[in-house]
Image (cartoon, coloured by chain):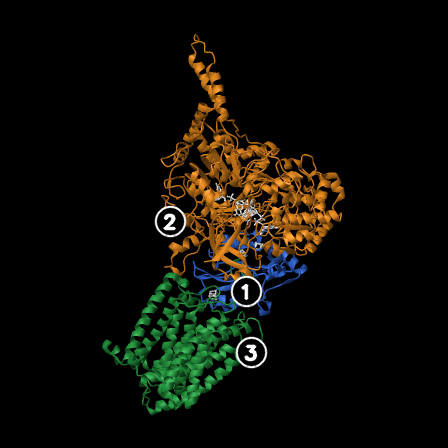
Amino acid sequence: MMAEAIKKQGIKEFITSIPFKKIGLKELFGFEKTPVNILIALSVIAFLAMFAIGVTTYLMHGHHAYNVTREHPWGLLIAVYIFFVVSSTGLCIVGSLGDVFGFKDYMMISKRAIFGSIVTIIAGFAVIAFEIGHPVTMMIYNVLTPGLTSAIWWMGTLYGLYLTFMIVEFVFLLKNDMKSAKIFGLIGLLVGLAAHSNLGSVFGFLNARPISNGVFYPTYFILTAFITGIFIAFIMMGFRYKLKFPENAKIMLTNLAKIQGLLISILIFFVTWKMLTDIYGSMPDRADVAIHILGSWTFWAEVILAMAIPLVIILASSGRAVNTLFFASLSGMIGVFFMRYNLVHDTQLKPLQMLKKTEYQLSPEWIHYFPSSAEIMISLGGLGLCLAMYYAGTKFFNLDADEHH
Amino acid sequence: MKIEISRRRFLQGSVALSVVGGTSLGLTSVFAESEEHGSDMVTTKTGTGPATEVATLCEMCVNKCAALARVENGVITKLNPNPMFPKSRNMLCPRGNAGIQSVYDPDRLKYPMIRIGEKGEGKFKRVSWDEAYEAILNGTDKFPGMAKILDEEKDNRSSFLFCAGEGMAEHTFKTFFSAFGSSNWLNHSSLCLQTVTSGYGVTIGAYALADLENAEYVIMAGANRAEAIVTPDTMDIFKRTKGRGAKMICIDPRFTNTAAKADKWLAINPGTDLAFVLALTYVILSEEIYDKAYVAENFNGFEEYKNSVLSNKYTPEWAEKITTIKAKDIYEIAREFMAHAPKAVYYPGRRSTFSNNDFQLRRAMAIFQALSGGIDTKGGLIFGKKLKLGEHEGLEPIYARAESRAIEKVKGEKGQSGYEDCAIVAGGGSWISWRNRYIEDKMPYKVRGMFIYKHNPMMNMPNIQKTAQMMKKMELVVAIDTMPTDTVMYADVVLPECTYLERTDPVKTFEGAEPAIAQRNKVIEPMFETKPVIDIMRGLTQKISKTLFGITKKYDEDVRDELALLESDPLSEDNNATTAVKKTLEQREAEVYAEFDMTKPFEQTQEEINEHIVKAIYGEGAVKALEEHGVFYPNMDRFFKQISANEHQYYPEKEKSYRVGNGKVKTESKKVECNLQAMAEKGIDPMPVWRDEYNFSVPDSKFRLLTGRHAQFTQSGTANNTVLLDLMSENYIWINRKVATEKGIEFGDLVEVSSSIGKTRLKAYPTEKIGPKMVFFIHGFGEESEALTWAYKNGGNDNAVIEDAIEPVYGASSMHETNVEIRKV
Amino acid sequence: MANYAMALDYKNCINCKACEVACKEENGVLKGADKHRIWVGANEVKGEWPNLDIVSATFVPSQCQHCEEAPCQDVCPTNATYYNEHGVVLVNAEMCILCSYCMNACPYDARYVDDRTATVDKCTFCSDTRLARGETTTACQNTCPTKVRTFGDLDDPNSEISELLRTREHFTLKSHLGTKPKLYYLT
Ligand SMILES: Nc1nc2c(c(=O)[nH]1)N[C@H]1C(S)=C(S)[C@@H](COP(=O)(O)OP(=O)(O)OC[C@H]3O[C@@H](n4cnc5c(=O)[nH]c(N)nc54)[C@H](O)[C@@H]3O)O[C@H]1N2
Ligand SMILES: Nc1nc2c(c(=O)[nH]1)N[C@H]1C(S)=C(S)[C@@H](COP(=O)(O)OP(=O)(O)OC[C@H]3O[C@@H](n4cnc5c(=O)[nH]c(N)nc54)[C@H](O)[C@@H]3O)O[C@H]1N2
Ligand code: SF4
Ligand code: SF4
Ligand code: SF4
Ligand code: SF4
Ligand code: SF4
Ligand SMILES: [Mo]
């Protein structure tokens, strides 16, 4: 289809005909100087600076700049990467509601959401590039000697494809070629979901780690992606309309909130049963880990911020308190961050080796991990990148739905 | 330490060597701090290219295991076990493997140095060998030379002390000591195995070996063979415990790795083993289950001893109160031991004297063993065979002015023949009593200089404050070492020996059921300006010999008489061959000098000497075998075979020397000596008895301090070895878990350990493996020399708190007679 | 084509750690306590002084199990981890991207990062050192004072290890995970 379109137009024209606003530097950096906006702008600049510092530290010291160890090889950056790619998948789902599945109410957010899915996954890639020791080698050997049994290989490859499809979809959206957008959107969505469940299986396949092993994560990932997408939809729309939503936005958001209510309920149901089966299964390395997780504050941060608060507000207002839900969605995203962090950390909680390897050491109990400053800086840098790209997007492109019908 | 060459430069040198075979840097770490970390963090990978293999012997501890050193491009890349040596049975322990690090340790001594700062301050100047020898002879503005001291002491050669740690070249240094003519020789034995060797020596005539390959029952008391490695015992016993041929009872106040491998572990109250053995003896005597036939034929004083044990009622019930070992266990062990006799061993052990009754303990152990008949027999204690070696001429001149050993006989008490320090003075002397009298000015004459070879008295003698006092008081201290140790810091002249992998050492014969001769061959050329001790001795004696003879000529009446005799030789005036007569005179003076010519024993190289003493007996083939394989014994080419990947045959079973004297012991009388009347004259119990003063009391709030070994370290000698420190980074103090909880001490808390003589700090290890009234930590850590990058103040130093208790018979240092307090800091 | 494996007479082990040093020195493993291909595990002894349970203090020498169904291989995205022709599980440092997935996936904690190449390293059965030179034992086996290890070819019915596995009872670690480990513990 793209080939067709290009054949029709010629590649050069195809690209030059992508509509975008020709703006000067002044306009690019021009925004309403409200205290909140200034604060956000300063934060983004600070985050980008941190990114630079974090990356430099990493380039100088390699993984020694991180607090990852033999026992806890995956740290914050993996969690943040997952955070971003899940956000991306979520936005892709939300975006697809309108342009792929044709739910008219959601058309107004499609372009914005698809653009959001692009910037979040790019941010995710930017972060993971500094976690993978040899990204260049990766590109070479992913192709030369693909590890077809590796969930990471599938996940990486599919996400690469997914990004391509998302960009193409976005271009068609910009060009208002809704038919092509729909086709690419659908493929992108399917690839994204495949990539995403593979990300779940990165953990699900770990039979060394009974707490993560199994079918739970691949499905759970899709569910939480959708939830994340809706949280971000609220946030994007909240900023877009400065919380003064037009009626059609209110309707859409209320509908989204209702879906969200359902999804969060399912999530709580899932998590509860996962915990119950983990604990009552009494399986070693599973039950004890689950109990340990119940005792960690990060787990409760996830539950309260991402599940309890949004759900209570949705239920109390039947999804109509969209302004409050904007803030609940901010809370939800913080909760989702903990959800990702917990996923990564909890997988590695239990030492694989329970014997003492040196004389003067305590018997291994739980693996401790706290991210290093470089890890934190690169992570915030990822957020900064994401926000900056999104901001630029709002300047260059019209992310609102075109009044075409 | 201020040496004029920076460590960085050495590092660069050694790094260039040690990255051979290393891989290139990864993309992402091109900026990495390879400068600071990369370098000394690398071990050398062995390659697949050309390599040579040199047969050598390990000297990371006393065992002398045979090793094959792999050399690639002049760098030692690996030390492998040499399968051909029966004593080490194709193994190298962790320290043996880490021996490479001793060669490439960036901190090692590299150049001769002389002191330029205050004594003990550690400020030295790099000098040439000749300047170093010159400083020893004539001193500097900081310290007097040997010539001045000997002149002032009127050629009393004993005004110099010589001390040495155990090692293959200790003999070379001792040759120098003999040629020098001093009587003051001290070695590690009074800090180590003096009482056990002597206890067995006077009782059964020798410090026998245990045949742990064949014993069916082993009492392992106060010996930690899983951690304090002694070959071949460590290799033999642990394959056979746990129902696999030998039942091993471990008696130790701590639950050690040996205990973990034992069939039964019994915690004993420290210092009470004598009561335990006496009770075992009581059981077998009262139940008459000892080997009557053996006793009838081989014992002296059996009846007296039997009476003593029975009439003193050394019952298991009596012993239970002292030792805390249940009477029931004692009965059981005694009976089981006899049921397995003569394939039963009460393991003699090799260790420092722990308590004041140690000599009597060893006697009681030897007698108990003999009562079972398990002596000079397979599966029991054995003497084994020793292959003879030829002789190398030493030099033992007699200096008229040299005083005898600086010890004093007891005065006053009639009928007693001992010395002030102890009853008997053995060859190795009594280190701490010598030191203590020295600092208290209780020497019969002045001792002003000291030579130290491969020994670290600052670290290895209880009460380091006193050792430091001694070192400061010595006017001229010459240390020959490989590392800038705490002792080296007190030296005036530091002579860097090359490590054991850079030299050939005196060939040595090892006795046993499977006797062999082994030789350490030089693996690589000495690095920097280091030299083997024999070369050092050659250079030094060439420098000092004539001058010292001059001093002898001046003061020594005998020499003067001899020379006067020569001078008064009638010279015939009319003989016009005056010059000829004069020449003769010179020649004749040279003859006298020849008796005192210290350079003589060092004329040949070590290789020549070894060849000489081997060839004389075993011929050229043996010399070749030793060079090639590091090991030789008659018929080795026929006997030695590999049986499996893990097993070798050294001698066929029927050629093994389990029994060499038809069961006879090796005392002069050929009898087991139960009752030593000669001891009584020296105020020592002639038979082992328990005395009330042996009950050591530990006040509430205090703890008895125990010390000992760890499998990955050798005393103080390996404390700077980075590969070993990877395995255990420092020593921790063992504290009973309940006690620790009461005191609020948790794992890893820093605690201060203090006694009447000093204190030290280290981290806490609360554990169930030790009882409530005692604490333990591994010996050899906590050095104070700043020149040791990794060992400096790493962990706690036991000798900073251990009091200098002296065992009464041989003046050995009793290591476990100290109570300490512990406090969380 | 051999099928290399190792049998461990683990009751012999005295926790001296000679094997650990031998491995480092033979294979140029980085210094540093957590940079190791081989280790000996111990439990803190159970019980209360002086009534301690000797059996609880057993030492367990271990290293990469060279699993026949190696999770580390399955998860490797670039096939940097591979089985060589002798069934030895190896890492090709050129191809390793340091995603650390294998470290997470190995149930035995057998892998670590080599800082020089910033890639994952592990026990190689001395393939590129001793075996490459035609030697028949590994450094850890060779040096052991109590001769815990026997290394050899499972496919050769006459090899010592085959003989041992025929005649002695043995078990493997975490075998319920289906990894088919090739480190056999002799009982
Ligand atoms: N790895 C290693 N091996 C070595 C050495 C080394 O430094 N490192 N050094 C070598 C040398 S020089 C020597 S002398 C030997 C020493 O070898 P060992 O004597 O075996 O070693 P130690 O650790 O001194 O003490 C042995 C055990 O005695 C226990 N013990 C303490 N007090 C008592 C007591 O009153 N009764 C009983 N029954 N047990 C007691 C200690 O807890 C300790 O476990 O080791 C040799 N081998
Ligand atoms: N508190 C306490 N004290 C003890 C003990 C204890 O258990 N506790 N153990 C005692 C026992 S059993 C012993 S045997 C003694 C041991 O006492 P030492 O004989 O002093 O033994 P090490 O501590 O090994 O020190 C050996 C010295 O030799 C040096 N050296 C190593 N190789 C060479 C070489 O090739 N040439 C030269 N010239 N020097 C070399 C080392 O650098 C080191 O300085 O310690 C005793 N002291
Ligand atoms: S026991 Fe270890 S340190 Fe001692 S000689 Fe043998 S290999 Fe070397
Ligand atoms: S070398 Fe042998 S005895 Fe020592 S720790 Fe390793 S396996 Fe155990
Ligand atoms: S033990 Fe671990 S590293 Fe070794 S093959 Fe098995 S999974 Fe891979
Ligand atoms: S870290 Fe290297 S060896 Fe391990 S899975 Fe990733 S690419 Fe493969
Ligand atoms: S087989 Fe070789 S690489 Fe593996 S642990 Fe042993 S010595 Fe190290
Ligand atoms: Mo010793």
Q: Is residue B240 left or right of residue B575?
A: right
**Distance between the alpha carbons at the discs numbered 2 and 1:** 40 Å
Q: Amino acid at mark 2?
A: Arg
Residue B809: percent from left, percent from top: 59, 40
Label 2: how many Cα within 10 Å (few below 14, some 14–19, many 20+) = few
Residue kind at label 1, given as amino acid type: Met
Seen in the image, is A109 located left or right of residue B375?
Answer: left
Q: CA distance from mark 1 to mark 3?
A: 24 Å
Above or below, A23 relative to B42: below
Q: Disc number at residue A98?
A: none
Q: Earlier in the sequence, mark 1 or mark 3?
A: 3
Q: Which chain is green?
A: A
- Tell me whether the residue at label 2 lies in contact with that at label 1, contact meaning CB atoms closer than 8 angstroms: no
Q: Secondary structure at mark 2?
A: helix
Whether residue B172 appears in this view of the structure is no
Q: For this rendering, which residue is in front, A191 or B93?
A: B93
Q: Which chain is blue?
A: C
Q: Which residue is mark 2?
A: B8
Secondary-structure class at tag 1: loop
The residue at which mark 1 appears reads as: A354
Depth check, mark 2 against mark 1: the one in front is 1
Q: Observer-nearest residue: B607 or A289?
A: A289
Image quarter hosting the C terminus of chain A: bottom left
Graded by Cα atoms within 10 Å as few (under 14), some (14 to 19) or many (20 or more), the crowding at tag 3 reads: some
Q: Position of residue A251 (x, y in %)?
A: 37, 91
Q: Which chain is orange?
A: B
Check disc 3 and give the amino acid type. Thr
Chain letter of the residue carrying label 1 = A
Q: Please tell me which residue lies in front, A7 or B161.
A: B161
Q: Point out the frontmost of discs 3 and 2.
A: 3
Same-chain check, marks 3 and 2: no
For the residue pair B380 and B293, the one nearer the viewer reads as B293
